[in-house]
Image (tube, rainbow, N blue to C red):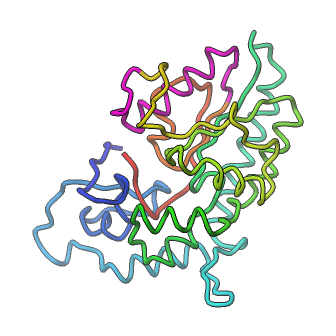
Amino acid sequence: MRRLRPLPTTRRGRATAAVAAAAVAGTALFATGAATADNSVPRSDKEIPNLTKVEDQIEAYYGDTVINGEHYASPNSPYAQQVEGVEAKAKAYLRQAVRHDHGKKPAIVLDVDDTTLLTYNYELEVGFAYTTASSDTYIRTRTMPAVFGMTRLVDWAAQQGVTVFYVTGRPEAQRAPSAANLAAVGYKPAADASHFFLKNPTNPPAYLPCGATCTTVQYKSGTREHIESLGYDIVANFGDQYSDLSGGYADKDFKLPNPMYYIP
């Protein structure tokens, strides 16, 4: 499959699934489990999916449920079932991986948004119209639910002697509420300063040569390289975006589904 170029957007480099679908004529949006974007130019309105229908598809995929005026994903939804399949494969792999002597301490790396914490509630609340301000307010004042089943997988991995690291594109200023959210929904062990990496463009770490200008791939792969330099072997890397997984420094990648947005 070709690598698709992101649309111009103010969404933290993100293009909503609806806008991405409108730009990619004839593309099956949910085929890969990730929203994508392209620079294709439709030659007719008939080549452009209807935005409202695309959003309706997203809600159906997540099993949209409204409780006290708030939208939630359903644990019985196609999304939850797809995540369960990824988790089953990951657990089977990890069960074998931890038995091997890698010469280093085994570790896993997990992204945060839509890998460990589900942003569906926020996306529906803002109508898929992400802004830095609204996201920051939500993160600081609300508790995002865990991605279905991921707390069990992470807890199980930790019990097998695997060290758990979190690497997110969230800014350093959101460390405290992000760590609190992870703990509140059951992630163990806690995402402490030694195991939780956030972007810090003001004071970037020395191990990232790109400094404040890192792309997502450079930042995440460079951080994984740093973790491995500390004596760990990253046996598995989990993310909902291909940019979470690209760049190496992990034995195996696990892609979680996310049709809501795309991060290059």
In the drawing, does residue 134 fall left or right of residue 6?
right
Along the viewing direction, whichever of 25 and 236 lies nearer the viewer: 236
Q: Nearer the viewer, residue 164 or 141?
A: 141
Quadrant for residue 38, please give it: bottom left
Residue 179 in the figure: left or right of residue 260: right
- Identified at 80% across, 28% down, the residue is 96
- In the foreground, 83 or 190: 190
Say above or below: 145 vs 160.
below
Task: Look at the image and tell me in which quarter the N terminus lies.
Answer: top left
Q: Which secondary structure class fits the magenta region best?
A: helix
Asked if residue 195 is positioned above or below residue 176 in the image, the reply reads above
Frontmost residue, 148 versus 203:
203
Residue 92 screen position, x and y as percent = 78, 38
Give the image location of residue 139, x and y in percent. Answer: 58, 62
Residue numbers of the magenta segment: 209-235
Which residue does the image show at 57% across and 20% down from the upper left? 226
